[in-house]
Image: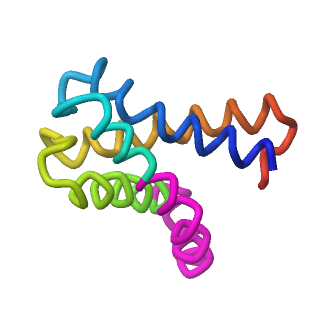
Amino acid sequence: MFATLLRFAVTVAAIPLCAQYFPGVHMADWTKAALIGVILGALYILFRPVVRLLLKVINWLTLGLLYVAVDAWLVWAAAQMLQGAVTFDSFWWAAAVALAVNAGRTVAGALTGKLRD
């Protein structure tokens, strides 16, 4: 339970931090960016396992790059739910944010000892 909450907190914190430090990611303010993080965390909890299960065979053929594209799409979709709160210059910046979020979630999982939760 603690590992899940820590990953959720990392997801929420990663969006405003990426908007602050990545030049292709822009935010209106910190609270709206954190709300995008909450939405992204909910999408990661609800939809990510289902999408990954459905795309498992195709992902094997793409050597894991499909999961990166799915995560970037989830980041992009979360940002579009609140128009203007967080904007990306291109899809590649959404992919960079997805990689940063996943790196933070992996570190949080390693710290709690639950990499596969």
Residue at 77% x, 43% y: name it: 3
Left or right for 80, reference 112: left
Residue at 51% x, 60% y: name it: 42
- Magenta span includes 57: yes
Q: Main secondary structure of the magenta part?
A: helix
Count every numbered label the image shows and give the total: 0
Residue at 54% x, 68% y: name it: 59
- Give the residue at the far top of this rendering: 21
Q: Position of residue 68 (x, y in %)?
A: 45, 53
Vertical position of residue 84 compared to residue 60: above or below = above
Vertical position of residue 101 compared to residue 46: above or below = above
Left or right for 110, reference 68: right
Vertical position of residue 19 compared to residue 78: above or below = above
Vertical position of residue 18 compared to residue 60: above or below = above
Q: Position of residue 47 (x, y in %)?
A: 51, 71
- Magenta span includes 70: no
- Give the residue at the far bottom of this rendering: 54
The residue lying toward the viewer, choosing from 51 and 12, is 12
Residue 74 in which image quadrant: bottom left
The residue lying toward the viewer, choosing from 62 and 54, is 54
Residue at 25% x, 60% y: name it: 81
Q: Position of residue 110 (x, y in %)?
A: 78, 33
Which range is magenta?
39-65
The residue lying toward the viewer, choosing from 101 and 86, is 86
Quadrant location, the C terminus: bottom right
| Model colouring | rainbow
Left or right for 39, reference 115: left
